[in-house]
Image (cartoon, rainbow, N blue to C red):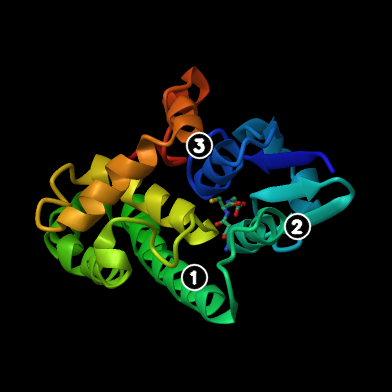
Amino acid sequence: GEYTLTYFPVRGRGEAIRMLLADQGQEWIEDVVNGEIWQKGDLKQLCVFGQLPRFQDGNFILHQSNAILRHLARNHGLYGQDAKEAALLDMVNDGVEDLRLKYGHLIYQNYESGKAAYIEALPAELRPFEKLLAQNDGGKGFIVGKQIAFADYNLLDLLHVHLVLAPNCLASLPLLAGYVQRLNARPLLKDFLESDARKKRFINGNGKQ
Ligand code: GSH
């Protein structure tokens, strides 16, 4: 079926989905919702939880960014090689979600007064991912198993946004730093990351980053 991503003109909870699609050589329609359209309220009514992103796979409509990532993982063989790898990918993705929620709280509710303490605590928040990488083939590959998976795109996006917030946040986490460089260099992902559309997109809806 044809893919459509309906989302605000920001990276936000859309960017891991976009990176997965781009890296898998998929085409998709960007249905960009600006504040004016959203304020009208009709689209919000259509959304199961009243929020975006919304995703269409042909006639099939799905909400919740992590459910969308998992659906695409099943469609494109990005959910590990067996049930244990799938479970570990779920674990990683839940860990990404935990930190993404803290990041969202900082950006939308506590930026000015919370930024310094957040950056101070950041290496400790990221260290679990460094350890997981170390345990998988010495950190030379992906987060779980021998192939890229949906959680890699979500983790990569989480690292990208934190590298903007705190450019030195991976200084004590060399495996994660190498992981970002390695994934960024994947040909299709590199093209996406260097595209004008991507460069123009704000990270968050309030312009803070
Ligand atoms: N758990 C949801 C997901 O992962 O998709 C959260 C979705 C969410 O927070 N969406 C925000 C939104 O739609 C933008 S990132 N805000 C507008 C509103 O709530 O009216």
Q: Which amino acid lies under the numbered mark 1 shown in the image of this protein?
A: Leu
Q: CA distance from mark 1 to mark 2?
A: 20 Å
Which one is nearer the viewer's eye here, 204 or 137? 137
Q: What crowding class fits label 3: few (fewer than 14 Cα within 10 Å), some (14-19), or many (20 or more)?
A: many
- Locate residue 175, reporting x and y percent: 21, 56
At horizontal 43% and vertical 32% (from top left) the residue drawn is 202
- Answer yes or no: is residue 73 visible: yes
Q: Which amino acid lies under the numbered mark 2 shown in the image of this protein?
A: Leu
Q: Secondary structure at mark 2?
A: strand
Tell which tag, 3 or 1, sits nearer the viewer.
1
Which one is nearer the viewer's eye here, 93 or 49? 93
Q: Are marks 1 and 2 in contact (CB under 8 Å)?
A: no
Give the labeled residue for mark 3. Answer: 10
- Answer yes or no: is residue 133 visible: no
Specify whether tag 3 is near ligand 1 (CB below 8 Å).
yes
Q: Furthest residue to the right?
A: 59
- Locate residue 14, reporting x and y percent: 56, 45
Tell me which label, 3 or 1, sits earlier in the chain: 3
Specify whether tag 2 is near ligand 1 (CB below 8 Å).
no
State left or right for residue 76 relative to residue 95: right
Q: What crowding class fits label 1: few (fewer than 14 Cα within 10 Å), some (14-19), or many (20 or more)?
A: many
Tell me which label, 2 or 3, sits earlier in the chain: 3
Q: Which of the labelled discs sits on residue 62, or is there none?
A: 2
Q: Which of the labelled discs sits on residue 89, or is there none?
A: 1
State left or right for residue 8 relative to residue 209: right
Q: What crowding class fits label 2: few (fewer than 14 Cα within 10 Å), some (14-19), or many (20 or more)?
A: some
Q: Which amino acid lies under the numbered mark 3 shown in the image of this protein?
A: Val
Q: Are marks 2 and 3 in contact (CB under 8 Å)?
A: no
Tell me which label, 1 or 2, sits earlier in the chain: 2
Q: How many marks?
A: 3
Q: CA distance from mark 3 to mark 1?
A: 25 Å
At horizontal 26% and vertical 40% (from top left) the residue drawn is 164
